[in-house]
Image: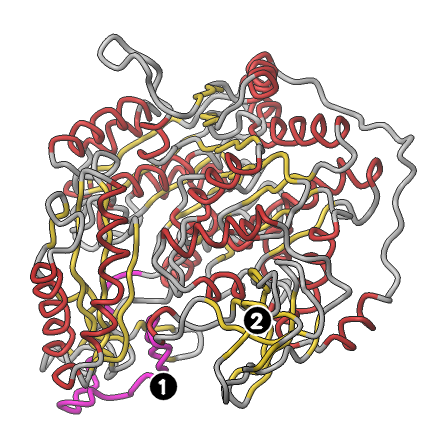
């Protein structure tokens, strides 16, 4: 028998479909507490792992069997605590992923690559000193609604849904709640999440400006994928050690190691960006709720257009529902400074000339704003110049050879680009099929809007008699480091008269001089097969409308009213009717009624299983086989779980990989989870069968946002 001084069980980054168990065992010269970061051999490599547990007594193995030893211990990093490990374990279990896959993905990339001696050198570098804690924070006066929200958050347990109109001052409530928590407990920490990277800088500026003088220059750190690996490691270590009191970040920050966590804020909680779409498909918003309950931290979800799940979960008690929802709803309906919400004006595009992009009334309204020195914003959620190029003679379209999608025409660099696989070619001078030179763009993108507005406003002058200036913000114009910040600075300084962009410009930005917002082609989302399409469109338009008229003093000085223009072929649609009155509660009530009648979330629970294969037939055959195997095995939960037949995805081929999916629904979350857990080995076994040779991968998506 072989005897070791200590046997540790380590979580490593192995995908759930690899067949490797959650934990691998290694020999250690000394006992290692759970949560210790170690370097261990895995095959021919040496990788980072997290000690999950250890055998208390020396371990024994059969004769001839050996355990590989731990290669090194990252002594400079304190073990990851039990609440963090419980969060990772729950996420892996709930979202049907391997424990080590979730645990290691939650750690900064550079930490996975550093050897113990390299990390030790890194930790010896000096850090920013603390500020003079005698400094006091100068607070601005809260409105009655803000104060009411603050008092209720201080008094109740939560979770809280802060339902505040755009411009109502939700961020100031977050700041004040964080301040009270930090001042009451010298070890307390707060986590503040935003849905997208581009919203982080302005939020960081406000938090640093408020808290750095009081708690030190290193009190506020950021965590998001736009940072360099050294920056992410530095922020993570600061949070893990407790020296960082506030962590600002995107969805990945929900896994930050925060031993003193007392407050979690999820701003714009409705945003689909909080749902991870690759690997472990977790919802950062939902994990924030779970983590807050487990660690005794208060959780604030903030939005002007809450997700229907959160709205339903915050329903007040009623005669037929005496308990009500699990969240406490706090309402802030008024804008700061008594600023009015945008007046919504709808343009019936059926009454406009064919192929009109900017209707005459809208163009006149934008012209008047430019002449008065005011700013306008034009929203189109499609980048590029045109979605597709088309041959008039033979009907050829610029299809991607690797995907079931068109290549988008980008006029700026004369390329055709697939936004799914990235395949890029130069724009042809002649049709590749028939040789005709008569090829034209079809549809509109932000590039084309920018170009057309430039032509339409070429004779329009600003108050200083200079020509109107137009700028575009989308994923194409903000690729370079610092490009987004520079463009936003131009908007804030008044150098831009008309801002054209995608949904990037519709969320969270505090533009002070915009008095008109226009959605030129929003109808595409109205008739989507996705049952959440109307909810998303309403949220996007409400958020966009909230960019107008945010500075009440400026609006009063201008003597004008802020407006939201919507150009639609269906101007009487329920989405636009609710938008006209800014009536989210009415819209939510109508949507929830439809969802309940159709037994859809939040009144049911869903999961998807997707199969990627060389052919669509192989993908669907695999899903059909695992369904049959589930029924044959009589898996638990099948009596209340409905398995629908497999179908191709809307875009069924991406990068030459065919994709199919099948939907599962249940009225019981617990039953669905029991079924999925029991189904995992069936999926693994079925994959290895010869008839599924062309299968590349399968994955499970729990609580999917797109179907």
On-image quarter of the C terminus: bottom left
- Return the residue nearer the eye: 94 or 126: 94
Q: Is residue 164 left or right of residue 684?
A: right
- Disc 1 is placed on an element classified as strand
> Magenta span covers which residues?
416-444
Q: Position of residue 314 (x, y in %)?
A: 38, 24
Label 2: which secondary element: loop
Q: Which residue is mark 1?
A: 426
User: CA–CA distance between discs 2 and 1?
Assistant: 64 Å
Q: Quadrant of the N terminus?
A: bottom right
In the picture, measured across the screen, residue 380 lies left or right of residue 571, that is right
Please name the residue shown 44% across and 53% down the image.
501
Q: Residue furthest front?
A: 1
Residue 491, compared with residue 312, is above or below; it is below
Q: Quadrant of residue 387?
A: bottom left
Q: Which residue is mark 2?
A: 59
Q: Residue at x 53, y 55 (%)?
A: 252
The reply to whether residue 468 is visible in this rendering is no
Which of 361/523 is in front? 523
Secondary structure character of the magenta stretch overall: loop
Image quadrant in which you'd find residue 484: bottom right
Q: Residue at x 66, y 59 (%)?
A: 33
Determine if the magenta segment contains residue 417: yes
- Crowd around label 2: few <14 · some 14–19 · many ≥20 (10 Å): some
Residue 363 appears at what percent x and percent y?
36, 43
């Amino acid at each position: 028998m072989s005897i070791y001084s200590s046997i540790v069980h380590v979580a490593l980054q192995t995908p759930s479909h690899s067949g490797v168990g959650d934990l691998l065992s290694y020999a250690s010269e000394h006992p290692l507490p759970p949560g210790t970061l170690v370097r261990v051999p895995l095959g021919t490599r040496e990788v980072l792992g997290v000690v999950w547990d250890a055998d208390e007594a020396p371990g024994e193995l059969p004769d001839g069997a050996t355990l590989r030893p731990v290669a090194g211990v990252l002594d400079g990093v304190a073990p990851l605590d039990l609440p963090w490990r419980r969060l990772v374990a729950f996420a892996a279990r709930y979202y049907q992923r391997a424990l080590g896959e979730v645990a290691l993905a939650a750690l900064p990339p550079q930490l996975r690559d550093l050897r113990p001696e390299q990390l030790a050198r890194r930790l010896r570098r000096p850090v920013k000193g603390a500020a003079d804690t005698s400094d006091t924070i100068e607070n601005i006066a809260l409105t009655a609604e803000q104060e009411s929200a603050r008092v209720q958050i201080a008094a109740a347990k939560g979770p809280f849904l802060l339902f505040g109109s755009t411009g109502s001052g939700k961020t100031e409530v977050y700041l004040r709640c964080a301040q009270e928590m930090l001042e009451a407990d010298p070890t307390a920490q707060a986590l503040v999440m935003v849905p997208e990277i581009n919203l982080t800088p302005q939020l960081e500026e406000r938090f640093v400006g408020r808290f750095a003088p009081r708690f030190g220059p290193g009190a506020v750190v950021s965590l998001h994928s736009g940072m360099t690996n050294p920056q992410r490691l530095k922020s993570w270590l600061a949070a893990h050690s407790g020296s960082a009191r506030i962590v600002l970040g995107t969805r990945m920050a929900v896994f930050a190691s925060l031993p003193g966590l007392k407050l979690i804020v999820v701003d714009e909680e409705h945003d689909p960006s909080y749902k991870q779409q690759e690997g472990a498909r977790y919802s950062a918003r939902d994990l924030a709720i779970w983590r807050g309950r487990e660690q005794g931290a208060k959780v604030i979800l903030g939005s002007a257009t809450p997700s229907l799940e959160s709205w339903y979960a915050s329903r007040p008690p009623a005669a037929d529902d005496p308990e009500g929802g699990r969240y406490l709803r706090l309402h802030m309906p008024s804008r700061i400074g008594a600023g009015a919400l945008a007046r919504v004006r709808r343009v019936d595009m059926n009454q406009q000339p064919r192929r009109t992009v900017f209707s005459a009334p809208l163009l006149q309204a934008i012209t008047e704003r430019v002449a008065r020195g005011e700013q306008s914003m034009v929203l189109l959620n499609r980048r590029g110049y045109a979605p597709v190029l088309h041959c008039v003679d033979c009907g050829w379209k610029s299809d991607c050879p690797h995907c079931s999608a068109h290549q988008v025409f980008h006029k700026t660099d004369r390329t055709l680009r697939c936004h799914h696989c990235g395949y890029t070619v130069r724009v042809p001078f002649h049709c590749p099929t028939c040789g005709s030179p008569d090829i034209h763009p079809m549809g509109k993108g932000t590039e084309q809007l920018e170009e057309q507005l430039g032509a339409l406003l070429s004779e329009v002058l600003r108050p200083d008699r200079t020509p109107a200036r137009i700028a575009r913000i989308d994923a194409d114009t903000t690729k370079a480091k610092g490009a987004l910040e520079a463009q936003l600075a131009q908007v804030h300084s008044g150098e831009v008269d008309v801002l054209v962009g995608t949904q990037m410009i519709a969320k969270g930005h505090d533009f002070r001089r915009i008095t008109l917002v226009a959605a030129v082609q929003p109808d595409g989302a109205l008739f989507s097969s996705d049952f959440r399409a109307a909810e998303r469109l309403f949220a996007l338009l409400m958020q966009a409308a909230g960019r107008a008229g945010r500075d009440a003093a400026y609006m009063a000085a201008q003597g004008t009213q802020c407006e939201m223009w919507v150009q639609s072929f269906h101007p009487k649609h329920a989405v636009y009717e609710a938008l006209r009155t800014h009536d989210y509660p009415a819209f939510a009530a109508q949507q929830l009624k439809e969802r309940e009648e159709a037994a859809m979330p939040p009144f049911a629970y869903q999961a998807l299983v997707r199969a990627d294969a060389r052919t669509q037939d192989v993908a669907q055959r695999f899903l059909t086989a695992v369904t049959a195997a589930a029924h044959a095995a009589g898996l638990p939960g099948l009596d209340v779980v409905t398995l629908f037949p497999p179908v191709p995805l809307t875009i069924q081929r991406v990068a030459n990989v065919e994709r199919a999916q099948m939907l599962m629904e249940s009225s019981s979350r617990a039953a669905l989870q029991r079924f999925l857990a029991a189904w995992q080995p069936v999926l693994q076994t079925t994959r290895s069968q010869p008839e599924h040779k062309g299968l590349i991968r399968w994955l499970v998506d729990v609580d999917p946002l797109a179907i």
